[in-house]
Amino acid sequence: MSDPPQQVLAAHLVSGEHLLWCGQPGWRGSLEEMGPLGRFGYCAGLLLIGIPAIVILGALIRALLSDSGQLKSAAGLLAGIVFICGLVWALIREPLGGKAAREQTYYGVTDQRIVIVSGPPAKRQAASWMLSVLQKVTYGEGEDGWGSVYFPTLGSPTLGPLRNAREVFEIVQKAQAPTR
């Protein structure tokens, strides 16, 4: 479980700075965010790839075994196993592995800066951008309400994916208004 964004970002504020918004990136495809139909579809996808992969591996093992039970080609078997493991990893990497990275990333909008803190608690690193030097802010949002907030300047941050991109966009615009 991740720390509350307010608590993490408070340690990175400068004197007199006010936190206007804070949050963490989400993932619209996470198993927690999927409804029952989405979870069913994800599991069906695992089965549609997993079952044929097991059948292919079984055929590969049978073809590589000679009549005396000796393995003809260990390299062929290893290649088949690596291929199938790659397929399975491609399916489970983002829901499982990406979750940890998202839980260790914190976004903040202050009256002066955009702040991004990332990493595990013992090794957290912060990056920030002054609102006064960031160019035009834009956002993109899908029909489902998920989106990202973009700063077109080279080296500038992107905040997302967020469930409330429009809200964050409006907060950034209001915070930038006094600096323009």
Image: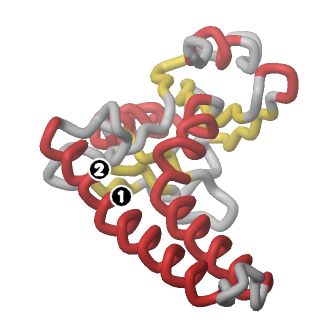
Q: How many angstroms separate mark 1 from mark 2 (CA)?
A: 5 Å
Image quarter hosting the N terminus: top right
Q: Quadrant of residue 83?
A: bottom right
- Residue sitting at x 34%, y 38%: 31
Q: Identify the residue under disc 1.
A: 46
- Residue sitting at x 71%, y 39%: 128
Query: Residue 158, how many percent across, how many down?
Result: 53, 52
Query: Residue 18, how many percent across, how many down?
Result: 58, 14
Query: Residue 82, how many percent across, how many down?
Result: 67, 72
Is residue 106 shown above or below 143? above
The residue under label 1 is which amino acid type?
Leu
Query: Residue 61, how many percent across, how many down?
Result: 60, 79
The structure's colour scheme is secondary structure
Is residue 53 shown above or below 129? below
- Residue sitting at x 56%, y 82%: 62
Is residue 40 shown above or below 88? above
Labels 1 & 2 near each other (Cβ < 8 A): yes
Depth check, front residue: 27 or 50: 50
Residue 27 shown left or right of residue 118 in the figure: left
Q: Identify the residue under disc 2.
A: 43
Depth check, front residue: 38 or 87: 87
Residue 32 shown left or right of residue 158 in the figure: left
Q: Residues within 10 Å of mark 1 (few under 14, many from 20)?
A: some
